[in-house]
C-alpha cells in the first residue's frame, strides 16, 4: 500500500514539474567576474594524503569556457623520499560553460624530480582531473579527483597509476 502511494505521489510531482513553466528554464549562467585564482591544497599542509605534498596552484581564465592551471609541489623528506614537482592542466568547464566556476574536466601533465638517498629519479605523470569550483566573493574552494599514469623510465621508482582526492582553497581576483 505504501509503495503504491509513493508511486502516485512521485508521478504527480513529475507531471507538475514537467508541465509547469519556469522563468529560469532558458536563463544563461552568469560568467564569473574573477579571472584568476591562487590556491593551496590544505590537506597536504596538514600532513594528510599519500605523500604529504605542499602544493600551490595558479589558475587563469583563457576563454569563457577554458582556463589553464599551473602547479608546483614540494615533497618534504617522507619515508626516505623528497622532491619537487611542476604540473599543468587545461580545464574545460562543462556544466554551464563559464570559466573558473562550476564543473570542469582537464587533461593534466606533471613532472616530479625525486631523490631517495643518493639516487635521483624523474617521473612524468599523464592523466586528468575532475573538479567543481565555487567562488564566494573573492574566495574559492575546489574539491577534485585526480588520476595519473606515472612513467619513471628504467628506474621504475614511483611508476604506475596514481589517484587521489583533495580540495584547493584560494583567493580569486
Image (cartoon, helix red, strand yellow):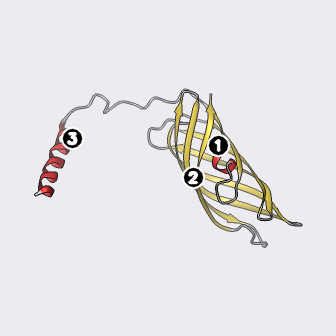
Which quarter of the picture shows residue 49? bottom right
Q: Looking at the image, do the residues carrying marks 1 and 3 touch, with CB atoms under 8 Å apart? A: no
N-term mark: 2 or 3: 3
Separation (CA) of disc 2 from disc 3: 34 Å
- Residue 106: horizontal and vertical position, in percent? 57, 49
Residue drawn at point x = 15 percent, y = 53 percent: 7
Residue drawn at point x = 15 percent, y = 57 percent: 3
Residue 3 versus residue 17 in the image, above or below = below
Please give the label number shown on residue 18: 3
Which quarter of the picture shows residue 62? top right
- Residue 121: horizontal and vertical position, in percent? 81, 64
Name the secondary structure under disc 3: helix
Please give the label number shown on residue 69: 1
Q: Looking at the image, do the residues carrying marks 1 and 2 touch, with CB atoms under 8 Å apart? A: no
Q: Which of 46 and 131 is in front in this view?
A: 46
Quarter containing the C terminus: top right
N-term mark: 1 or 3: 3
- Residue 72: horizontal and vertical position, in percent? 73, 47
Name the secondary structure under disc 1: strand
Residue 134 versus residue 144 in the image, above or below = above
Q: Name the residue under label 2.
A: 129
Q: Which of 71 and 65 is in front in this view?
A: 71
Amino acid at each position: 500500500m505504501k509503495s503504491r502511494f509513493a508511486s502516485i505521489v512521485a508521478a504527480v510531482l513529475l507531471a507538475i514539474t514537467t508541465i509547469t513553466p519556469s522563468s529560469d528554464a532558458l536563463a544563461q549562467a552568469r560568467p564569473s567576474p574573477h579571472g584568476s585564482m591562487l590556491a593551496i591544497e590544505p590537506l597536504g599542509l596538514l600532513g594528510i594524503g599519500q605523500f604529504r605534498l605542499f602544493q600551490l596552484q595558479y589558475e587563469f581564465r583563457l576563454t569563457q569556457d577554458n582556463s589553464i592551471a599551473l602547479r608546483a609541489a614540494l615533497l618534504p623528506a617522507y619515508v626516505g623520499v623528497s622532491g619537487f614537482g611542476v604540473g599543468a592542466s587545461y580545464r574545460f568547464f562543462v556544466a554551464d560553460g563559464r570559466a573558473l566556476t562550476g564543473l570542469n574536466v582537464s587533461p593534466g601533465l606533471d613532472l616530479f624530480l625525486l631523490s631517495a638517498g643518493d639516487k635521483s629519479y624523474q617521473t612524468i605523470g599523464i592523466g586528468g582531473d575532475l573538479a567543481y569550483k565555487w567562488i564566494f566573493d573573492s574566495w574559492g574552494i575546489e574539491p577534485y579527483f585526480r588520476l595519473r599514469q606515472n612513467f619513471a623510465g628504467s628506474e621504475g621508482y614511483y611508476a604506475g597509476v596514481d589517484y587521489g582526492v583533495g580540495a584547493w582553497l584560494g583567493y580569486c581576483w
